[in-house]
Image: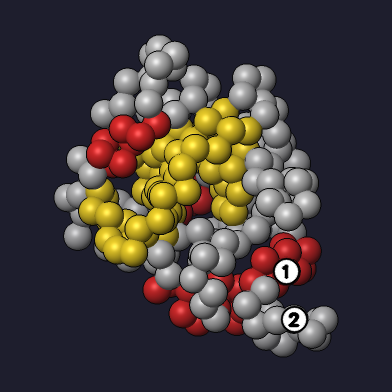
């Protein structure tokens, strides 16, 4: 299906009127102080200090670093083991069961490229997905294999729309990727994309 703008009701259901305090179930779009007008000579090592101007980076912090993606990819995450695009998925840095996923570390990802990229997600947390699928017989899954659970959910409820946020150069998203079915995308942008990622307990400065 083609992408479309949300209806007024959809917009109200997914966009908070005041900054939320629950980082385990909230997504934030932020502008950074990084100047990316001339990418030549840009040092990605300056990203963490720029992030500290707008975020509290709670321990333990893990710097993933810079990732480069080709342009025009519907989904952008590549499996390190198989070198293939994995599609919509749930991260598992902290290896938590579904009911505890809201306590996992979240991530901040800064667009340090010269073109827009996208962050896509299913607007339902992992524990909500697990509850909705509790009555459906399915394959015997590892309790931590929430990616497979999320994909079965999307097949069962294909009318629940995926949300796509556009992240412009110099902007960042903060998201609980351990608690969301999600992926990045460079669709519609032919040039390669770069983003810098850091994992921790991250709260935008000035939020509750």
Q: How many angstroms separate mark 1 from mark 2 (CA)?
A: 8 Å
Which quarter of the image is occupied by the N terminus? top right
Q: Residues within 10 Å of mark 1 (few under 14, many from 20)?
A: some
Element under disc 1: helix
Q: Position of residue 147 (x, y in %)?
A: 67, 66
Task: Give SS at disc 2.
Answer: loop
Q: Quadrant of the C terminus?
A: bottom left
Image position of 135 (left or right of 12): right
The residue singled out by tag 1 in the image is 148
Nearest the eye: 106 or 1 = 106
Question: Horizontal and vertical percent for residue 69?
Answer: 63, 33
Q: Are the residues flagged by discs 1 and 2 in contact, CB closer than 8 Å? A: yes
Disc 2 target residue: 141
Count of marks, rendered view: 2
User: Which residue occupies 54% across, 74% down?
Assistant: 95
Is 200 on the left-hand or right-hand side of 127? left
Instruction: Give x and y (percent) for residue 17.
Output: 30, 51
Task: Pick whichever, 20 or 142, lies toward us.
Answer: 142
Q: In this picture, is 154 found above or below 1?
A: below
């Amino acid at each position: 299906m083609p992408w479309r703008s949300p209806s007024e009701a959809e917009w109200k259901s997914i966009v908070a009127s005041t900054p939320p305090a629950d980082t385990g179930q909230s997504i934030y779009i932020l502008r950074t102080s990084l100047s990316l007008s001339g990418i030549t000579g840009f040092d990605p090592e300056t990203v963490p200090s720029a992030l500290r101007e707008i975020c509290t980076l709670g321990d333990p912090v893990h710097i993933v670093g810079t990732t480069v993606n080709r342009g025009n990819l519907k989904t952008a995450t590549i499996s390190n083991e198989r070198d293939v695009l994995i599609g919509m998925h749930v991260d598992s840095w902290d290896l938590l069961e579904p009911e505890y996923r809201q306590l996992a570390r979240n991530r901040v990802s800064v667009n340090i490229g010269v073109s827009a990229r996208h962050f896509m997600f299913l607007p339902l947390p992992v524990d909500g997905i697990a509850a909705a699928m509790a009555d459906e017989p399915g394959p015997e899954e590892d309790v931590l294999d929430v990616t497979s659970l999320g994909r079965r959910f999307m097949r069962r409820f294909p009318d629940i729309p995926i949300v796509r946020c556009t992240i412009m150069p110099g902007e960042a998203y903060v998201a609980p990727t351990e608690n969301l079915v999600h992926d990045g995308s460079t669709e519609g942008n032919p040039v390669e994309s770069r983003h810098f990622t850091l994992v921790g307990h991250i709260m935008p400065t000035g939020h509750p």
